[in-house]
Each structure stands twice: as C-alpha cells, then as structure tokens.
Image (cartoon, rainbow, N blue to C red):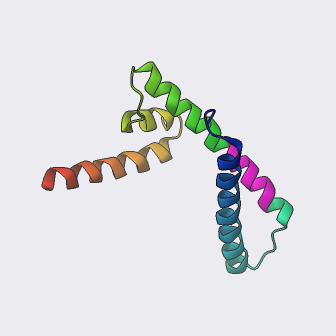
Amino acid sequence: MANMDEATAERLKSALWFSIGKIVDEESLRWNVNATPQFIGALTEMAWVQLENAGQDLENFAKHAGRQTVGIEDVLLLTRRNEGLEALIRAFVDKLMERKRDR
C-alpha cells in the first residue's frame, strides 16, 4: 500500500472502521455485551496494520517470482503458517478451479 495516496488510505480505513463497527455491534447484541468506541478503534487499527503487512507480503511474493500481479500461489504462500486458514483458502481455490473446469 506504499503507492496509495493518503486520501485513498483514509477512505479505506474509514470503510474498514465502519464494517468492523457493524460486525461488533451485531455481535454485541447477539452476546448481550457492550463494546466501546475505543475497542472498535483499536480493533480497526489492528486489522489495518495486518492488512498492510499482508498486502506488502503479497506484493513481495509476486515480485520475487517475477510477476507484477498477485496470484493464488502468493495467497497460499501467505497462509502457510496458519493451517486452518490455509485449508479454507485451499478448499475455496479447489472449488473455484472445479467450477472453471466444468464450464
């Protein structure tokens, strides 16, 4: 996200904050608990940093492979340390490839 202008980054961060806020509100009602605006802000900041890191890693994986476009193999490489996430992504990719073959 290094090549993103500040205004775009702020709009994306605001959209992330809004989405996280909606999810937290729904879950708070579901579990009958309260969440402060500070909690939502901290959660948003944590998610933003994780997304920035993941984006940078994906760009670096693609660049290392001599590509300018991030591919499925880059996403799978990113998930290699999280077996549960890797299994979910791999299952999704397998279904996607299966549908593509069936066309």
Residue found at x 47% / y 26%: 61
The kind of secondary structure the magenta stretch mainly shows is helix
Q: How many marks?
A: 0
Above or below: residue 34 compared with residue 8: below
100, 83: nearer the viewer: 100
Above or below: residue 96 compared with residue 75: below
Residue found at x 80% / y 53%: 42
46, 62: nearer the viewer: 62
Above or below: residue 3 compared with residue 87: above
Looking at the picture, how far across and down is residue 47, in whole percent? Answer: 68, 49
Looking at the picture, how far across and down is residue 66, in whole percent? Answer: 39, 20
Does residue 33 appear to the left or right of 89 in the view shown? right
13, 43: nearer the viewer: 13
Tell me, yes or no, whether the highlighted magenta stretch contains residue 2. no
Magenta stretch bounds = 40-49
* Quadrant housing residue 41: bottom right
Looking at the picture, how far across and down is residue 51, in whole percent? Answer: 62, 43
Residue found at x 73% / y 47%: 46
